[in-house]
Amino acid sequence: MLETLTDDDPLAKPAQFSRGVGPNRAKLLEKLGIETVGDLIVHLPRDVLDLTDVRAVHELVEKETQSILGTVVDRDSRITSTGKTMTAVLFQADTGFIRGVWFNQPYMLAKFQDGQRVVLSGKPKFRDRRWEFSHPHVQWLGDDDDERGGGILPKYGLTEGLRQHELRRIIRNAVEDAVEFVTDTWPDAIRDRLKVPSLAEALRLLHMPRTMDEYQLGRRRVLLSEILEFQIGMALRQRYWRKSHISRPIEVSAKVDARIRRLFPFQLTAGQSETIREVAADLARNSAMHRLLQADVGAGKTAIAVYGMLAAIAAGGQAVLLAPTEVLARQHWQTIDDLLAESRVERRLLVGDQLAFERREILEGLASGRVQLAVGTQALIQDQVRFANLQFAVIDEQHKFGVRQRASFSTTEGFSPHVLVMTATPIPRSLCLTQFGDLSLSTIKELPPGRAKVITARIRGPGARRKMWNHIRQQLAAGRQVYIVCPRVGETPDDDDVPINESDDTATAESVYATLSKGELRDYRVGLVHGRLPRELKQQAMDDFRDGETQVLVSTTVIEVGVDVANASIMVIQQAERFGLSQLHQLRGRIGRGRHVGYCFALSEAETPEAAKRLNAFESISDGFQLAEVDLEIRGAGDVLGVRQSGNLPFQHADPARDKDLFEEAHAEAQQLVDRGDIDEPDYAMLKVGVLERFGALMELPHTG
Ligand code: ADP
Ligand code: MG
């Protein structure tokens, strides 16, 4: 963040020589990664303690937000007459006692220890001769928080042997002595547009705020520094892609457009039409499209893929669709082959287990240009696959965050194909901007009309389970079908990266199958499918279910991607707490496809607050985009991205889960800076150099941007 110009730059001075440090403390600071005065200045507070409006008990009034400082003297938790848990904590304040109460948050009890000092903020009420704060905001004071001075106190990350008030003083000294030497790479124009102070001023506000507004403003600028530079890098990457991926422009004539639309047995939704407009506009350019399409399950992404492919074929090119699994590739093939039943488009399915001569014939067809359209798994982009004239490539349901491993296609005569990446799982917007900030984004929000509603309920306890099975038997008697989904043993939420250990989930699915087919569902025809079955048996089990031979299908998450059975309107998810929110939502997308009301039952006996939050959200929210945002809030960016991908978040301070709006603002600003060419102006040179130094290698940017 700081540009150090020369060795006699005050910011480059060893921290040891900063006021109030010395050799011993310098060693402690080193443990925090602090070596220079500049490092001290960018050791940002993790939080602040707001003591600006701490009142005495006799100063409290009703209906106004106020703070009070107290020491825990008593605490207890009980069940009220209405069946809620009530946690009450008694605090001794300066001139009397006050009470804090929390309903249905039993875990609050353990957060308080006798003798602990806290600041409570909220709107108090006078009840039972005492001031009471209901669900107040709590700030816990450390042993060495010196609250006597009041004001706003920064709280820093510490290391053993270094106390909060000591570090506060050390950093304050450094800021007072050297912050003025912090240079700002941002030109005034950006600061004006984003309404932020200079970097030096922002750092001063952050460390020594007089009001919460000042603190927020300082924080905003410092976080934006990081995020904006990252987003500029992404925008430069996008520009670089456009420059280095020349493609043949494809004009979609009205005639071609009408011919493609006629293939669909339905009217496109507004969202589909809009996306098609965006795709068509991209195709008309001579730089390759690089677009991400996000849509909820069942929103109709396939139609977009088909449109793009046929447009390219009509222009004399070839098109491919790549799916992550063979099951999905076959399903797409089925759909596309059916749609094109009356057409002369030469099309092939290319999957792993084809016979050698068959495969050779397809590859030759692709190389000669005879085969116009191919559907397959990643096998399609292996080295030996050559295309005569590939102009459009669709990558479906690629792993959500595999940005850097994005498929690369061999070019034909220096021309690159247009690329459309489709994700089935909506990604929270702020994560999308960081992971896919260099792609153009299309979103389809609505589902096609006429979809049945899906009712979701969390089922807990024997009574609820009994009622559920009764309901399910009624539905079975009425002709409906049921999925029963079992988790992998040891599954962590959304852990898509863990290779599926087939034997793990087999055990669960088999035991659930055994129990149910002898118990609750003994009068019905129950099938079983899991990953360890040979392919023919897997297919057989799926076919039997589709044809109604079996009424119930017990399965592992094999069905997450794949089957489409309109009559299956009920889903039971076993041990639902083991699934991540997006996976639960994916599963639910399998039902409610026909005209019958769908029922999704999430079975879980889990007690943890995290599981409760997740399952509550699943119960009450049906929109995949909204769920994705909640998921991010609950789990944080690192967990949503997964361990391996969180390395893709090169932020020291910014957090896509917390700082959503800043990502949005920075993205818009970065796009404009690059689109208008401002970033190439002399005024912006220092900023651009900073971006390239920091993100150039990561984003594989050329040195000139
Ligand atoms: P996804 O976005 O999950 O890939 P699909 O493309 O598989 O969705 O479409 C889901 C289902 O909705 C398919 O059966 C498809 O035929 C149907 N469908 C797609 N678009 C429309 C539409 N505009 N009107 C009605 N049905 C549609
Ligand atoms: Mg799909």
Image: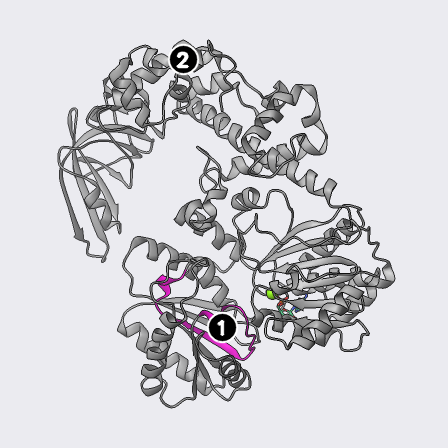
Q: Quadrant of residue 148?
A: top left
* Visible residue check, residue 50: no
Q: Which residue is mark 1?
A: 598
* Visible residue check, residue 178: yes
169 on left or right of 694? left
- Residue type pointed to by label 2: Lys
Q: Which residues are magenta?
A: 557-579
Q: Which residue is mark 2?
A: 13
Query: Residue 524's spot in the image, x, y percent?
Result: 41, 89
Mark 1 closeness class: few <14, some 14–19, many ≥20 residues within 10 Å: many
Dividing the image into four quarters, tell me where ligand 2 lies.
bottom right
Mark 2 closeness class: few <14, some 14–19, many ≥20 residues within 10 Å: some
Could you give the CA–CA distance between mark 2 and mark 1, rounded to whole angstroms?
A: 67 Å
Q: Secondary structure at mark 1?
A: strand
**Viewer-side residue, 581 vs 338:** 338
**Viewer-side residue, 116 vs 289:** 289
As for residue 378 lying within the magenta part, the answer is: no
Q: Is residue 645 above or below residue 146?
A: below
Q: Secondary structure at mark 2?
A: loop
Query: Residue 237's spot in the image, x, y percent?
Result: 64, 39
